[in-house]
Image: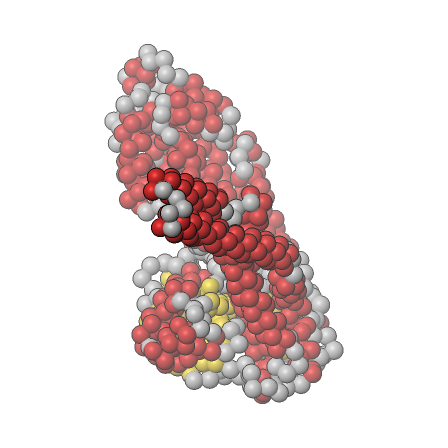
């Protein structure tokens, strides 16, 4: 038998497995064993972890990851090396399952985890009794990821199929545990424990998901099924196997959501009869003036294809109202590139949309990608689904015209990445765009579209709403006459709550508490109107208000949301140039401290240049902020007040204050002191260099004087010889002595010159 063979080998693999099984969830014994045998568990640790991704590459829908080929090759080498060690593949496979499960607990970057799982399943080929049974647990992890993806799509029925597949794997694990009980007791206990825990947990998930889906459709008729699901969850919580894992807290969260739904069966439920939802994804273009960006889009945008979506129309203006007429030539204006509409098929097969997609370019620089769709008969689960769709953590769905499942934020990110490429090519190929950029000293390589994956804002407009007598599509409804009637309805807190980063439990929206019930525009709206704002949502409840009065508010809400990208870009630019300035100052201070004579003038010029660039940026940013938050941007003081209140409620004023502080710091600091110190050093070294130059000139004159003097004396001696005052021999002696003295004086002068 395989284990009999292994038992004769004193390499400790069974001890490592025994320790791992005995201390549930702690893979360190496995790691230590792999490390002792040179199988590099540290490299394996990194592969499924999101935190190993470079910050600039992180995308919430999966993130940058090793290529499949890279992971396949490394895992294949590890498996090959492990196969040469008795018990190696058993320990390695257990460790792979452990680190992947650990990564799943920490992150929604599922792609990296799935890549490692797939590589392991491809590579491990061992004809023994143990390894295949352990390897099958990776299938369970794959299905668990599918359950989690369905959960964060707010699609309860989509959780059912993969959860049932987990149960199938659990039954097989129980059978494997029985078969291995006498062969390898530690592995048998491991498989049996997993089978029991997963069976209890995922039976609860299946029951709860079916009950929630039925309750959303049938309402009170599904209440008995909902209560039975609550009991299934309660029993699972009490299971000893589940109590040894983190699943207990998740079961508790599911159960409390279902209990809240059951308790709310007799309450009034909010229904948005008519309205719309707009997703705002701000972005900025760095490296080129915003007016030039708008011009590039105007001249070439009609021919662009972005993330597989061709531009279908261009509006040579922004569709805005008289609010933005302003009292200055620097108006809020630009253009719109319209992309094809999207139909979204949710994870549980529901068709949503159409979603209208537009790229809005602004002369002021607050560009954004805009996605709009209608809300008709939307109940609380629908509202939650629509709101959460904006988040980058939302699960994968099918979008028309997109080749593979993706979420909306991921598709938006692809559009903006391609937009950056199209802008660079358009500017490079068009002299009317390229020449002004080159004349301003701005290299084309620095033209980039800047957009954070987590930066979005949702603007919800509720034009008409009802109160339904309980859940279910057929529950009787009564039109709401005012906002006060809606505040106690089930689902109202969904509109008051910011969009969360993820979904943690089935129907978790049912346990929201209203966190933004205050009217952000109190005193500026009608009695039937209510405006709520959070850090990533603005909700306009406008019951009985004509559309032409709602549209200006919607536009102002979108404008305010779009400022986040612009302000963030300015903060990035100022920070970048401050970093360059600090680096230059550090080099200059090091030169002064070490007494280096070279490079002071160059350091001084570099600091002065960086300081000038930074001061220009500060001036531009201050001018723009004064305009964006000043009275001349819009037509009236009331509209200015509305913008200011929206900026305060959504956190834009905080970003603005941070930028102001950054600008103030950039305008002061140690740069002037360093420049003064360098200037003094440069002036002193200039004086010293001038003194050395003067000394050298004097020494050269002295050397010539010695040579000239010696020559003159030789001439005098020759005259004396001609007059018979000196004999020929005496004349020669005096001439040689004179020349030797002159040469010695000249050499001494030259030596002194080279010392300077």
Task: Place residue 683 in its image quadrant.
Answer: bottom right
Task: Place residue 52 in its image quadrant.
Answer: top left
The residue at 49%/23% (across/down) is 22
Q: In the image, is residue 410 above or below residue 719?
A: below
Tell me residue 723's x, y (percent): 38, 51
Inspect this view and state whether residue 636 appears. yes
The residue at 53%/35% (across/down) is 245
Nearer the observer, 682 or 66:
682
Is the image coloured rainbow, by chain, by secondary structure, or in one colour?
secondary structure
Which quarter of the rendering shows the N terminus? top left
Tell me residue 401's x, y (percent): 33, 67
Nearer the observer, 62 or 486:
62
Count of numbered badges drawn on the protein: 0
Task: Kindly give the residue lying farthest to the right in the view shown.
Answer: 523
The residue at 37%/16% (across/down) is 11
Task: Kindly give the residue lying farthest to the front in the view shown.
Answer: 724
Q: Is residue 199 left or right of residue 302?
A: right
Tell me residue 322's x, y (percent): 58, 88
Nearer the observer, 487 or 728:
728
The residue at 39%/26% (across/down) is 34
Inspect this view and state whether residue 208 appears. no
Q: Is residue 263 left or right of residue 214?
A: right
Tell me residue 705's x, y (percent): 46, 52
Nearer the observer, 120 or 717:
717
Q: In the image, is residue 269 above or below residue 83?
A: below
Task: Kindly give the residue lying farthest to the top in the view shown.
Answer: 8
């Amino acid at each position: 038998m395989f284990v009999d063979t292994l038992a004769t080998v004193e390499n400790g693999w069974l001890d490592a497995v025994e320790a791992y099984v005995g201390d549930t969830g702690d893979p360190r014994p496995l790691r230590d064993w792999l490390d002792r045998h040179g199988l590099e568990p540290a490299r394996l640790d990194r592969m499924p972890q999101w935190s190993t991704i470079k910050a600039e590459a992180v995308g919430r829908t999966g993130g940058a990851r090793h290529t499949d080929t890279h992971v396949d090759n490394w895992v294949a080498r590890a498996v090959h090396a492990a196969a040469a060690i008795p018990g190696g593949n058993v320990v390695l496979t257990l460790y792979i399952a452990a680190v992947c499960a650990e990564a799943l607990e920490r992150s929604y970057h599922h792609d990296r985890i799935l890549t490692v799982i797939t590589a392991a399943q491809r590579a491990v080929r061992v004809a023994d009794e143990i390894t295949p049974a352990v390897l099958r647990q990776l299938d369970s992890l794959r299905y668990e990821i599918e359950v989690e993806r369905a959960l964060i799509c707010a699609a309860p029925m989509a959780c059912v199929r993969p959860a049932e597949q987990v149960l199938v794997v659990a039954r097989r694990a129980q059978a494997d545990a029985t078969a291995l009980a006498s062969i390898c007791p530690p592995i048998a206990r491991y498989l049996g424990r997993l089978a029991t825990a997963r069976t209890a947990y995922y039976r609860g998930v299946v029951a709860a998901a079916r009950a929630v889906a039925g309750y959303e459709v049938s309402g009170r008729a599904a209440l008995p099924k909902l209560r039975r699901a609550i009991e299934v969850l309660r029993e699972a919580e009490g299971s000893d196997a589940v109590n040894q894992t983190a699943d207990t807290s998740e079961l508790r969260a599911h159960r409390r959501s279902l209990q809240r739904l059951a308790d709310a069966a007799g309450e009034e439920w909010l229904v948005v009869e008519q309205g719309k939802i707009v997703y705002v994804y701000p972005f900025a273009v760095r490296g080129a003036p915003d007016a030039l960006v708008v011009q590039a889009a105007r001249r070439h945008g009609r021919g662009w294809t972005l993330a597989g979506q061709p531009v279908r129309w261009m509006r040579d203006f922004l569709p805005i109202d008289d609010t933005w007429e302003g009292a200055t030539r620097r108006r809020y204006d630009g253009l719109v590139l319209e992309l094809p509409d999207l139909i979204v098929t949710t994870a549980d097969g529901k068709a949503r949309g159409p979603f209208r997609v537009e790229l809005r370019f602004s002369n002021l620089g607050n560009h954004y990608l805009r996605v709009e769709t209608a809300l008709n008969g939307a109940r609380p689960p629908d509202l939650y689904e629509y709101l959460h769709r904006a988040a980058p953590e939302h699960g994968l769905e099918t979008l028309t015209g997109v080749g593979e499942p993706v979420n909306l934020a991921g598709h938006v990110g692809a559009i903006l990445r391609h937009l950056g490429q199209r802008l660079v090519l358009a500017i490079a190929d068009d002299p009317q765009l390229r020449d002004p950029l080159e004349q301003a000293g701005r290299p084309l390589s620095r033209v980039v579209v800047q957009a954070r994956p987590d930066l979005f804002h949702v603007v919800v407009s509720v034009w008409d709403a009802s109160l339904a007598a309980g859940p279910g599509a057929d529950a009787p409804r009564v039109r709401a006459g005012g906002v006060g009637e809606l505040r106690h309805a089930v689902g109202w807190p969904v509109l008051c709550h910011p969009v969360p980063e993820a979904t943690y439990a089935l129907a978790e929206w049912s346990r929201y508490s209203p966190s933004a019930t205050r009217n952000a525009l109190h005193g500026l709206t009608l009695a039937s109107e209510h405006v709520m704002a959070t850090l990533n949502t603005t909700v306009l409840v406008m019951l009985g208000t004509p559309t032409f009065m709602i549209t200006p508010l919607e536009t102002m809400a979108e404008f305010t949301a779009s400022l986040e990208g612009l302000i963030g870009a300015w903060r990035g630019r100022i920070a970048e140039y401050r970093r360059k300035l600090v680096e230059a100052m550090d080099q200059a201070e090091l030169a002064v401290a070490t007494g280096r004579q070279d490079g002071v003038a160059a350091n001084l010029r570099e600091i002065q240049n960086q300081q000038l660039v930074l001061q220009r940026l500060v001036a531009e940013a201050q001018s723009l902020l004064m305009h964006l938050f000043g009275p001349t941007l819009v037509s009236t003081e009331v509209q200015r007040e509305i913008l200011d209140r929206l900026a305060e409620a959504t956190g834009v004023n905080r970003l603005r204050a941070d930028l102001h502080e950054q600008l103030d710091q950039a305008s002061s600091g140690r740069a002037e002191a360093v420049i003064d110190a360098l200037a003094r050093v440069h002036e002193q070294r200039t004086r010293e260099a001038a003194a050395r130059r003067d000394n050298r000139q004097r020494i050269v004159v002295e050397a010539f004087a010695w040579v000239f003097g010696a020559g003159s004396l030789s001439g005098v001696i020759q005259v004396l010889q001609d007059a018979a005052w000196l004999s020929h021999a005496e004349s020669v002696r005096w001439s040689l002595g004179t020349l030797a003295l002159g040469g010695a004086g000249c050499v001494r002068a030259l030596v002194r010159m080279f010392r300077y």
